[in-house]
Image: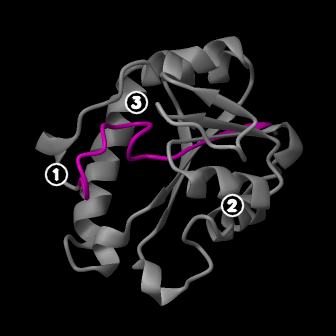
Amino acid sequence: MRAAFFDRDGIINIDHGYTYKIEDFTFCEGIFELMHTFEEKGYTLFIVTNQSGIGRGYYTKQNFEILTSWMLEEFTKNGIQIQQVYFCPHAPEENCSCRKPQIGMFEQALSEFEIDMQNSWMIGDKPSDIQAGKNAGITNTVFVNTLTCKDAKYNVKSLLDIINLI
C-alpha cells in the first residue's frame, strides 16, 4: 500500500506548543481537503507525532489519548479514515529510537502494514519530520513552512499547495 504520513502539531493542528486539550486544538486550514485528496488517490493515512510533553510531564498519555480519540472522531465525521496514529512520548534527552528524526514510528507502521515507502509521502513542518521520512526511505517529503528545508523534495507554504504535487 502507498501511505501518506502526517506530522500532527503544525500540520494537522495549529501548533500552540504542547497541545493536549480539545479546547486548544484547532485544525489547520486545508487539512481535510488534503487528506481527502490523498484518500481519493488511493493512499492510506497515518499520523506520526513526537509528543515530548508526555515525557516532560506537561500532560499524561491519557490526556494525549483523549485528544487523539476526539481528533479521529472529527476526521471520521469529515469522511476521512486515519489508519493509525503513532506517537513518541519521550523527551529529547531520552535518546529513544522513536522520536523523529529516528524511524521507530515508521518501523512500527511497517511491522503492522505492508507499506511501499518509496511511493509514500511524509508531510511535516520541521526538518526532523523530513529527515525521519528520508531515513525511513520515503522519497516524497513535503516541508510546509514559510522557511525552506534543503532536505525536502518539496517546500510549500500551505497544505493546499500539496494537492497539486500528488
Label 3 Cα neighbours within 10 Å, binned few <14 / some 14-19 / many ≥20: some
What numbered label is drawn on residue 106? 2
Q: Is residue 29 above or below residue 74?
A: above
Label 1 Cα neighbours within 10 Å, binned few <14 / some 14-19 / many ≥20: few
| Residue marked by disc 1 | 21
For the rendered model, the colour scheme is one colour
Q: Amino acid at mark 2?
A: Phe
Whether residue 14 is in magenta: the answer is yes
Closer-to-camera residue (31/152): 152
Left or right of 45 on screen, residue 56: left
**Magenta segment, which residues?**
2-19
- Residue visible at 58% across and 52% down? 127
Whether residue 132 is in magenta: the answer is no
Name which quarter of the figure residue 64 lies in.
bottom left
Outermost residue on the top side: it is 164
Left or right of 23 on screen, residue 161: right
Q: Secondary structure at mark 3?
A: helix
Is residue 116 visible from the viewing direction of this image? no
Cα distance, mark 2 to mark 3? 22 Å
Q: Nearer the viewer, mark 3 or mark 1?
A: 1
Q: Quadrant of the N terminus?
A: top right
Cα distance, mark 1 to mark 2? 26 Å
Cα distance, mark 3 to mark 1? 17 Å
Outermost residue on the left side: it is 23
Q: Amino acid at mark 3?
A: Phe
| Residue marked by disc 3 | 75
Q: Quadrant of the C terminus?
A: top right
Residue 47, percent from left and from top: 53, 48
Name which quarter of the figure residue 55 lies in.
bottom left
